[in-house]
Image (spheres, rainbow, N blue to C red):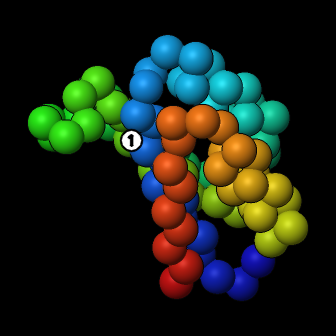
Amino acid sequence: MSSIRVLGVLVREPGQAALEVQKVLTKYGCTIKTRLGLNELENENLPGSGLILLELMGEETECIRLENDLLAIPDVTVQKMLF
């Protein structure tokens, strides 16, 4: 992968969605170079939400699979940055 790929993962409902997100992150653990979790955001529009920032490495196809698996989880929003 020649670019730097960063995913922002917003978990709106920390219950079941958080468990599903953790399963996906464990599955793709070798693709995640850096993980930063920001819990309980101070935002009245998103009470109880958490934000995870992921710096990815490895094959682009594997990074895309990770992103798609996260997008399939209800109450989870994913945004991508490429540099």
Q: Secondary structure at mark 1?
A: strand
Please name the amino acid that badge 1 sits on. Leu
Residue drawn 71% across the image and 84% down it: 2
- Residue 40, percent across and down? 26, 27
- Residue 32, percent across and down? 66, 49
Please tell me which residue lies in front, 13 or 19: 13
Decide if residue 25 is on the left or right side of residue 81. right
Residue 29 image-quadrant placement: top right
Other residues around mark 1 within 10 Å, as few (<14) / some (14–19) / many (≥20)? some
Please tell me which residue lies in front, 80 or 15: 15
Regarding residue 29, the answer to whether it shows in the image is no
Q: Which residue is mark 1?
A: 51
Residue drawn 86% across the image and 67% down it: 61
Please tell me which residue lies in front, 50 or 47: 47
Residue drawn 50% across the image and 50% down it: 77
Query: In which quadrant will I find the N terminus?
Result: bottom right
Decide if residue 22 is on the left or right side of residue 6. right
- Residue 23, percent across and down? 72, 26
